[in-house]
């Protein structure tokens, strides 16, 4: 038996587009001699469809796609993820299901049992968990179909769940496991995924064919990396990350352990590639081609410019240099050098005349009070307004360049440097931004050396430095990682040896600035805990603030 | 037996504040002769605590509050909602529990079984459902304790759930039902709540003592309205909305049906009062006193100004009139008249000099292209920037004045008129804003008549009217209600008799503008489906767009 894994990039709600893509992939799989082609979880409607699932009209369209695919399942079988209706009045209205289509018909439906409801996942908001487990027989093979998380309660050791779907299926003596996934990327996920699948293969003594979505859906990025596993738990082949691909595997070859193909898993290159795909898909799926961003001469905007140029092409990225009286010479020079290195179109737009007009207009209403954050924010917001004006005039999307450290402690101006349609770096700590910059420069200078070596500054008042108001980034980032990713409280973090005052101040800043993050652009998620839909903290809360 | 219902306003994460408030209420209940005082769901930590629940430190503090309250439970028993730990390794780490405290000790703990996971609720993200049901005996009465949603699967007729907690408890032959709630306000909720509680009382033939939270937590508003129900299903007393109160009821009186006290439930007055409380608590809990807002002479800003003055006092509300060359005379006059009527401080800040400086600065970068939305947005953003500048200078919170109709179809400028710390009207359709205005004027003119009668306009270009780009609001709002609140698809709405082109355009605008709502201020929720945490739609989605 030959099994094709179709690792494709779906588009939430684009039923026609997703269907046509699967029909083409089915043809391709046939040409590769496949007996069965497998598509990822919720492939008909795209993942995550979120509250679109609450619309009956949306479900009808998904059903239409399944019926259409069933008719195409001739001479080849198709396994595809799609929502299905729960016929029982009690419980949620839907299941998250895999349909097995063959001979022009729906041959079998298996529902997902383990419904992730944490971090970015809300599956129990929509779906009823499966309680029945069966297998399907096709061309002499007994196939255990399951979906994503269903393999993640190995030996019932995952504390979140009480049942083990594969244990239930084993009574039917399957010959192989087919897992349809939409498993979001984080910089540590690919390794974990291989570990869990390996342990499943070994435990059940069965080969696993695992197909994952590829592509970005607003905040959530899918890396692909579909895998065929031998029954001994060795990887036969891990398919490439970031690429759409239909690849057919011979059941006997996979079982015979004849090769091992693995992908590289270094953190910084993975983050780099994920962000490039995240930008590319955000623009492509929204129907935009061109990006604009402010180039300050600093490292964050430099790294975003490089990622944007790689995602969209340098001809589609426009930089704005917006110096003020507080800008140093090197800022403009470094920004200009970056634009030249990348071949970007750039404009220099001094903000002083606008800033001065604001100050003059506001003078009678400021009642002679001394300069404070208000004046600094006027500068940042003037820049935001200029960027949005050009973006509105010509149809660019503004890229936001805030990093995760700044986003965490609120070191940024709402409606100013927090503007943007997409936040590229807000899940990348400042220390990691430096690593990305060095990685980008590994084959020669792309980002000017001075941008990497100079001390970071917002340049909103004379001689300002980030270190005036924040702890050094290596310490700050280490504390933030414990609080945000590891969910450690102040006592635990202080016990690790960090200075108590610094810890309490950092955590207080994080919690006080929830109101800024609430209004921030969507953040490309690359870590296990990103700002956005996966982290839900009250704005009006008094905890640690 | 005498039972006190303590309908209090809690503050998420403010363990000391919440505890002290409960200790004072316990004293007050004692003075009223109560044998038992009841606090709402998750009273120790405030509701909804959201992802704070994932911090062990947060749970430890809640446990500390329960232990402290237990020691205070002498001469009186206390029922209080708090998270508790699930000792079993499998399943979620926490329960949503009610603690029964008496004689200085924890006497009984009952967990919540029905965990709402829809709309604004994420309870299954955090909590394991109860599987055991018991009662507690105190002073000769057998008390069935349960939490909020646990009474909302009456006769197992709620399709979301499969168990009926009270049916399980009935085997223990209770004498009364005590329900601890944090049940969010919507304009239709109080009536539904009474209906459900009445049917419970009648079904089980037991009196119900129901205590609800009061107060606003960012987006979610709690109205109070705690109730004592006779076993025949008549309301003995519905406590006031919007007010903190400790009130003691005599068990025998309630059972004897000796009185009926009900609150008024008219939609527009309820929305009015909810919004006033929402503003008041947002400011109070964040430690702010003063609001600023733009006064355009239009109805939305007028209604928000009245609500703000009623919530914060007229001395704490500052209005900015920011006319441009496109502003009509009546705009400034109407806005000024409103400020005078309300006794607000106001400033007139013409935006023309700033707008012109922007145009001059951008001229070389606009390449002679004809005016479009870019120029309109510069005006709206200049106003946003001016409001934020004064707010940053003096410590106001900017109130956003966008209504639900505009928010739905994206008729507003991101970082312009969408600025603000809190969105007051974004869950109130334009047609309802008119009803609010008329209600405010019922005892004499507060909002200038001309503001109510003139056709709405954004005044961003000569002679602009909302009706140039949008369908009449009565038709638009009716379509939006079907799509947003009732989750009807295009076919269903067209079948109701609405013009197909108008329906398709309206739905397309809603879905296309998800990116604006993603970055909008938190919205005070008054309807069953508000923008914000309760409505989760992909930004990059192709459904109906």
Image (spheres, coloured by chain):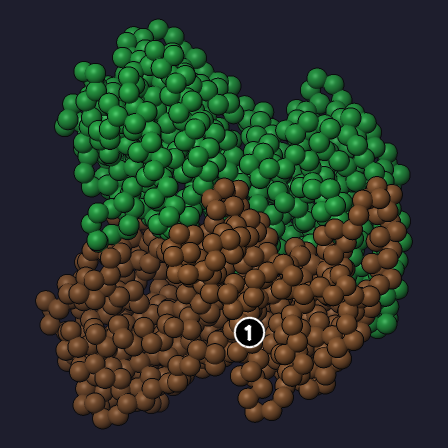
Chain colours: A green, B brown
Name the image quarter holding residue A133: top left
Residue at x 53%, y 83% (from the top left corner): B439
Instruction: State the image quarter where residue B189 is shown.
Output: bottom left
| Numbered disc 1: secondary structure | helix
Q: Is residue A265 above or below residue B279?
A: above
Left or right: where does residue A323 sit relative to residue B397?
Answer: right
Q: Position of residue A184 (x, y in %)?
A: 45, 34
- The answer to whether residue B341 shows anywhere in this view is yes
Instruction: Give above or below for A303 relative to B495.
Output: above
Q: Where does the N terminus of chain A fall, quadrant-wise?
A: top left
Q: Quadrant of residue A514?
A: bottom right
Q: Is residue B330 left or right of residue A197?
A: right
Q: Position of residue A535 (x, y in %)?
A: 49, 49
Q: Going 28% across and 50% down the picture, which residue do you hit?
A: A93
Q: Is residue B389 left or right of residue B138?
A: right
Residue A77 placed where, x, y %?
28, 22
Q: The C terminus of chain A is located in which quarter?
A: bottom right
Residue B244 % position (x, y): 44, 81
Asked if B309 appears above or below A208 in the picture, the reply is below
Q: Chain of mark 1?
A: B
Specify whether residue B249 is in view.
no
Circle count: 1
Circle 1 packing at 10 Å, graded few (<14), some (14-19), many (20+), is: many
Q: Is residue A119 left or right of residue B257?
A: right
Q: What residue is pinned by disc 1?
A: B433
Front residue of B110 and A491? B110
Residue at 52 percent of width and 34 percent of height: A216
The answer to whether residue B84 is above or below residue A101 is below
Please give the name of the residue rendered at 88% of the width and 51% of the height, measured from the top-left corner.
B360
In front here: A488 or B95?
B95
Q: Nearer the viewer, residue B500 or B361?
A: B500
């Amino acid at each position: 038996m030959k099994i094709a894994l179709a690792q494709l990039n779906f588009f939430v709600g684009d039923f026609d587009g997703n269907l046509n893509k699967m029909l083409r992939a089915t043809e391709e799989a046939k040409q590769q001699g496949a007996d069965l082609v497998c598509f990822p979880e919720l492939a008909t409607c795209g993942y995550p469809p979120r509250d679109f699932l609450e619309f009956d009209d949306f479900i009808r369209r998904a059903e239409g796609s399944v019926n259409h695919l069933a008719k195409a399942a001739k001479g080849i079988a198709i396994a595809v993820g799609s929502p299905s209706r729960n016929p029982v009045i009690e419980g949620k209205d839907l299941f998250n299901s895999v349909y097995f289509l063959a001979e022009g018909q729906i041959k079998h439906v298996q529902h997902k049992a383990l419904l992730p409801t944490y971090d970015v996942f809300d599956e129990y908001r929509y779906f009823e968990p499966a309680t029945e487990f069966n297998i399907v027989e096709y061309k002499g093979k007994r196939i255990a179909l399951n979906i994503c998380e269903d393999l993640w309660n190995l030996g019932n050791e995952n504390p979140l769940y009480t049942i083990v779907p594969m244990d239930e299926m084993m009574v039917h003596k399957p010959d192989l496991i087919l897992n349809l996934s939409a498993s979001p990327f984080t910089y540590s996920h690919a390794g974990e995924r291989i570990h869990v699948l390996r342990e499943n293969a070994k435990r059940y003594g069965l080969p696993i064919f695992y197909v994952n979505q590829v592509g970005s859906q607003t905040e959530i990025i899918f890396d692909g990396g579909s895998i065929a596993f031998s029954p001994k738990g060795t990887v036969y082949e891990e398919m490439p990350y970031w690429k759409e691909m239909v690849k057919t595997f011979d059941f006997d070859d996979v079982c015979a352990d004849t090769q091992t193909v693995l992908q590289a898993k270094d953190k910084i290159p993975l983050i780099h590639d994920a962000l490039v795909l995240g930008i590319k898909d955000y623009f492509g799926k929204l129907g935009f081609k061109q990006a604009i961003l402010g180039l300050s001469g600093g490292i964050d905007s430099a790294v975003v410019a490089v990622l944007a140029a790689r995602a969209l092409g340098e001809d589609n990225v426009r930089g704005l240099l917006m110096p003020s009286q507080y800008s140093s010479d090197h800022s403009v020079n470094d920004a200009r050098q970056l634009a030249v290195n990348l071949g970007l179109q750039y404009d220099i737009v001094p903000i002083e005349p606008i800033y001065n007009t604001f100050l003059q207009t506001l003078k009678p209403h400021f009642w002679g009070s001394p300069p404070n954050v208000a004046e600094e924010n006027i500068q940042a917001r003037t820049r935001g307004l200029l960027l949005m004006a050009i973006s509105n005039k010509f149809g660019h999307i503004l890229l936001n360049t805030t990093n995760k450290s700044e986003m965490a402690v609120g070191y940024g101006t709402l409606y100013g440097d927090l503007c943007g349609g997409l936040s590229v770096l807000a899940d990348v700590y400042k220390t990691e931004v430096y690593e990305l910059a060095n990685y980008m420069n590994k084959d020669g200078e792309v980002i000017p050396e001075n941008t990497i070596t100079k001390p970071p500054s917002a340049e909103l008042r004379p001689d300002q430095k980030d270190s005036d108001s924040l702890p050094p980034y290596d310490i700050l980032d280490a504390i933030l990682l414990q609080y945000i990713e590891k969910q450690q409280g102040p006592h635990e973090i202080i016990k690790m040896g960090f200075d108590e005052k610094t810890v309490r101040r950092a955590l207080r800043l994080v919690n006080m600035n929830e109101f800024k993050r609430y209004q921030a652009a969507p953040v490309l998620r690359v870590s296990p805990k990103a700002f956005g839909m996966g982290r839900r903290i009250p704005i009006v809360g008094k905890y640690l603030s």
